[in-house]
Image (tube, rainbow, N blue to C red):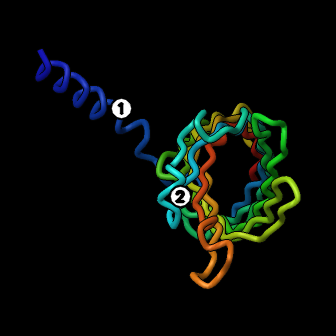
């Protein structure tokens, strides 16, 4: 039974391959402007230098559901690759209603392996830094995110999609710092609607 299901899935993928075979809808110099807005799920916190504080995952992070928004601009440098930048804003509240805000400023690279003119699947990587504030604490941290976004273009220029991904920040302290045991990695999971304009 399992082999039959696997064989059917392979045949469906092979039959659908010609639909996604076109990879020349975009050309060098094409540009895309996009706006994202949605929710921000708690992911994880790990205090890797403090064995007394166990890693926290999802709702154990003591964070509530939050929000995420961003604006991005990219230009295609090849038929499938676009480079640009993104400015974002994310927030979550702790269970005691303390606000955590993250403002990332990043370079963005997007690979679009599936592009038919009407339907795209894009994978993005963002690298940069983020201003983070929690309660009275403020600091600048390294930031990275990865995301996957299928989009449907209802006109030649305008598209609507859904994007899901993982955003990562880190807080580093040297071994001589009195905050050494507060060194941590944090991950949040934004899920957003994406409005895109291309030309």
User: Is residue 71 or residue 143 the one in the foreground?
Assistant: 143
User: Is residue 112 or residue 93 the one in the foreground?
Assistant: 93
Q: Residue at x 55, y 59 (%)?
A: 47
Q: Give the mark nearer the N terminus: 1 vs 2.
A: 1
**Do the CB atoms of the residues marked 1 and 2 lie less than 8 Å apart?**
no
Q: Which corner quadrant of the image does residue 164 belong to?
A: top right
How far across and how far down the image is residue 74, in percent? 71, 62
Residue at the extreme right: 136
- Please name the residue that numbered disc 2 is placed on: 111
User: Is residue 176 or residue 171 the one in the foreground?
Assistant: 176
How far across and how far down the image is residue 168, in percent? 60, 57
User: Is residue 187 or residue 198 the one in the foreground?
Assistant: 187
Q: Kindly state the secondary structure of the residue where label 2 is placed.
A: strand
- Please name the residue that numbered disc 1 is placed on: 16
Q: Which corner quadrant of the image does residue 98 belong to?
A: top right
Q: Is residue 66 above or below residue 126?
A: above
């Amino acid at each position: 039974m399992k082999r039959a299901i696997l064989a059917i899935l392979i045949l469906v993928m092979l039959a659908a391959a010609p639909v996604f075979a076109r990879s020349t809808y975009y050309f060098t110099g094409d540009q895309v402007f996009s706006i994202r807005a949605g929710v921000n799920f708690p992911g994880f916190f790990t205090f890797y230098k403090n064995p007394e504080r166990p890693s926290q995952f999802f709702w154990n992070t003591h964070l509530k559901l939050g929000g995420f928004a961003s604006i991005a601009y990219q230009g295609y440098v090849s038929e499938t690759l676009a480079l640009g930048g993104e400015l974002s804003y994310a927030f979550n509240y702790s269970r005691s209603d303390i606000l955590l805000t993250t403002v990332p400023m990043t370079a963005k690279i997007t690979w679009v392996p599936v592009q038919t003119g009407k339907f795209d699947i894009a994978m993005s990587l963002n690298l940069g830094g983020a201003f983070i504030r929690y309660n009275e604490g403020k600091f600048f941290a390294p930031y990275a995110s990865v995301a996957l976004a299928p989009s449907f273009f209802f006109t030649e220029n305008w598209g609507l999609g859904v994007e899901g991904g993982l955003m990562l920040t880190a807080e580093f302290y040297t071994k001589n710092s009195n905050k050494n045991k507060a060194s941590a990695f944090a991950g949040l999971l934004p899920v957003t609607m994406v409005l895109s304009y291309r030309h």
